[in-house]
Amino acid sequence: MSDIQDNSWQQAVERSVNDHFDEIREVRRYLHQHPEPSGAEVETTQYLARRLQKFGVKVQFGPENRGLIVDGPAFTTPKVGLRADIDALRIQDQKQTSYCSQVDGLMHACGHDAHSATVYGAMLALIDVEKSGLVDSIPWRVLFQPAEETNEGARQLVEAGAVDGLQALFSLHMDPSRQVGTIGVRTGDFTADCNELEIEVLGRGAHAARPHEACDPIAAVAQLISSIFLFVPRSTDSQEPVVVSFGQINAGQNPNVIPDRVLVRGTLRTLREEVSKNTISHLERLARGVAEASGTSIHVRHHGGPPAVYNDPRLTEILTSSATAILGRENVQEIPKPSMGGEDFANYLCKVKGAMFRLGCASGDSPAPPLHSPLFDIDENALAIGAKILARSVIQWCHEN
């Protein structure tokens, strides 16, 4: 990309986002009112596709008509991308707002509606700046991705060619723990390597009054969970975070009957794939020991979730620089430790360098409802801030490459 004409393009980004703010907010509110769960984002996809028709962009639908791969109107080979996610969660919206969810049992409680609106706003700014002639054609691509919550959407879009030719990819996540007007950045490890765990314990049922006639799977699973919480930390380097949590235990139908089967589900989160593999091996050893002691049969299964997000240093520097110009250095906050949450943005980073930041979206003095809360909401001024940071970062990357 040839030299950018002084700083006028930066002013053009600012103007464009401000001019389009009502439209950006309208997109967010429509999506918030009409949520669709992972794997069913057909109408969401159609809504976004209809809005994009007037901009002369190239739109490719994702598998099963869910999600979009959008290339700029210049039709140059895309080299830098922006990613948003579009799926909602099975949570009942309890907010009292004009734009609360109109679908029972579904809401955008993780901010994906806001991610989509923010990236939409950045895209409009890129189109406007390109038309202004202040910069050469910008080789951008925008991904509106389905099924982030189930760790399927990114991989589906990758298979559909979403990152073919890309050299850089930017994204963001709403952060209700930060005030609007601030962001969080971090180089390197950003989120965890995640695995879903399933432990099946098979025993022999009996009357609750005669436990000696049973091989009690409930007693076995209680011992196994206690052993995991006790011994996994003792077998892992203390500087390597490992989080094993169980959120579901299913067993039996009656209080006076010892069942013959227990099913336990949970998650394992680390920052390194090697640590995950070693921990799973240790879980299997513990299971064999408890099985032998209890006379049960225990099967440990694991299903890979998203790998860890690793923020590329140079791309993180570009995000930081863009945000500093907009917000001031004091409002661009270093995240001291990676999150142990999962993020399927990592599935793109197996193919292309990328970076993600956390966008403050809380307002007022009271603590904001957290992500995945039925009361989750955002200060919509965050939409403009995020759009400006993303658009500037794309143009800055092009200028350097």
Image (cartoon, helix red, strand yellow):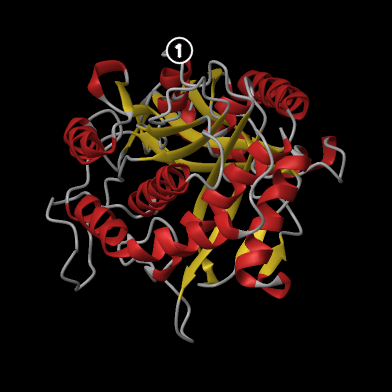
**Is 331 drawn above or below residue 136 in the view shown?**
below
Would residue 383 be seen by someone viewing this image from the given angle?
no
Which of the pair 206/337 is nearer the observer? 337
Check the picture and name the quadrant holding the C terminus.
top right
- Placement of the N terminus among the 4 image quadrants: top right
Residue 225 left/right relative to 234: left
Q: Is residue 226 above or below residue 69?
A: below
* Residue type for callout 1: Glu
Q: Where is residue 186 in the image (x, y as percent from the top left)?
A: 72, 52
Q: In this view, does 110 lie above or below 80?
A: below
- Mark 1 highlights which residue? 159
Residues 181 and 325: in front is: 325
Query: Which type of secondary structure does the marked residue at label 1 adopt?
Result: helix
- Residue shown at 17%/49% (left/top)? 34
Image x and y of residue 215, in percent:
49, 23
Q: Quadrant of residue 380?
A: bottom left
Quarter of the image where one finds residue 256: top left
The reply to whether residue 332 is visible in this rendering is: yes
Foreground residue, 401 or 206? 401
Q: Where is residue 387 drawn, in percent x and y? A: 47, 55
Indicate left or right for 310 with 56 as reference.
right
Residue at horizontal 40%, vertical 24%? 261
Looking at the image, residue 200 lies above or below residue 135: above
Residue at image coords 47%, 48%: 129
In the rendered image, residue 313, in percent from the top left (x then y), is placed at 78, 42
In the picture, measured across the screen, residue 271 lies left or right of residue 49, that is: right
Q: Name the foreground residue: 295 vs 249.
A: 249
